[in-house]
Amino acid sequence: MVKLIGKTKVCCAVFISGRGTNLKSIINYSKKKKSKIFLKLVITNKSNAYGIKFAKKNKIPTKIINYKNKIKAEKEIIKYLDKYNIRL
């Protein structure tokens, strides 16, 4: 895990499956000056998840990934985490 020092922010992705209540809280927190997170990506397996609307409203990219084939889904998730420079 990255040790947070000074103004450094950790790039994050959030996984949602529904209304996005927790996502909303994370986005609101990330906007605060004292926040140490920068939300760069929202991933979901449901194209109708309400949280997608909230992410788009806040200009956060979203990706919908089908989890039926877990190996393919994991590869796709890693691809997007790399693309958005999000480290595990």
Image (cartoon, grey):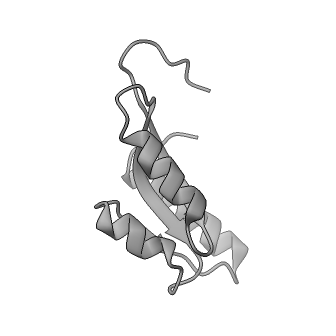
Q: Quadrant of residue 75?
A: bottom right
Residue 69 horizontal side relative to residue 26, left or right: right
Left or right of residue 80: residue 31: left
Q: Would you say 45 lies left or right of 6 here?
A: right
Rendered position, 86 above or below 57: above
Q: How many marks?
A: 0
Q: Measured from the top left, where is residue 73 in percent x and y? A: 62, 72
In the image shown, does 71 or 57 lie closer to the viewer? 57
Please indicate, yes or no, whether residue 19 appears anywhere in the rendered image.
Answer: yes
Q: What residue appears at the point 28 percent right and 61 percent down from the top-left corner?
A: 59
Image point (46%, 41%), residue name: 29
Q: Nearer the viewer, residue 58 or 11?
A: 58
Q: Residue furthest top?
A: 6
Image spot of residue 67 (x, y percent)? 66, 78
Position of the C terminus by quadrant: top right
Q: Position of residue 14 (x, y in %)?
A: 54, 56
The residue depicted at 57 percent of the width and 82 percent of the height is: 46
The x and y percentages for residue 1 are 62, 27
Q: Is residue 78 visible?
A: no
**84 vs 20: above or below:** above
Query: Who's the residue at 40% across and 68% down the image?
Result: 54
